[in-house]
Image: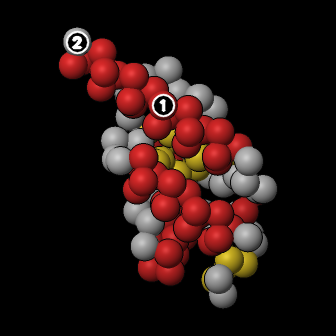
Amino acid sequence: ESVDAMREQFLKRRDFMVETINNIPNISCLKPGGAFYVMMNIQDLIGKELKGKVINNSMDFALHLLETSYVATVPGSAFGVEGFVRLSYAASMEEIAEGLKRIEEFVS
């Protein structure tokens, strides 16, 4: 019973994250079928300036987001998928909402 409750909470977090990301201009993601993370597509931001820095790759994006907005992601280059960053939804709904708010402000 408790496992089902946890599973339901993770699905809610995943769906919230996917919907929110897909409503932010210039980024997107697909709904993952498993695990606890989303691969966020940042390809439309490559070559653009965000918060005073040109983003050349997923490492630039991840580092600059962390330094300016205090949101940790993993560059897609670590997984062989440049142009993406990985976000975890193994956090509270409040933390996820705050992180996504900061990402939206960062890419705006």
Residue at horizontal 38 percent and vertical 30 percent from the top: 9
* Quarter of the figure that contains the N terminus: top left
Q: What numbered label is drawn on residue 31?
A: none
Left-right relation of 18 to 62: right
Q: Which residue is mark 2?
A: 1
Depth order, front residue of 63/38:
38
Q: Answer with mark 1 or mark 2, whichever residue precedes in sequence.
A: 2
Number of on-image labels: 2
Farthest-out residue, left: 2
Farthest-out residue, bottom: 52
Residue 50 visible? The answer is yes
Q: In the rendering, at what x and y percent does residue 12 appear?
A: 48, 31
Q: Which residue is mark 1?
A: 12
Amino acid type at circle 2 is: Glu
* Quarter of the figure that contains the C terminus: bottom right
Depth order, front residue of 73/96:
96
Q: In the rendering, at what x and y percent does residue 41 appear?
A: 65, 47
Residue at horizontal 59 percent and vertical 46 percent from the top: 40
Q: Secondary structure at mark 2?
A: loop
Residue 74 visible? The answer is no
Within 10 Å of the Cα at label 1, are there few (<14), some (14-19), or many (20+) other Cα atoms? Answer: some
Q: In the rendering, at what x and y percent does residue 38 appear?
A: 50, 39
Q: In the rendering, at what x and y percent does residue 102 appear?
A: 55, 67
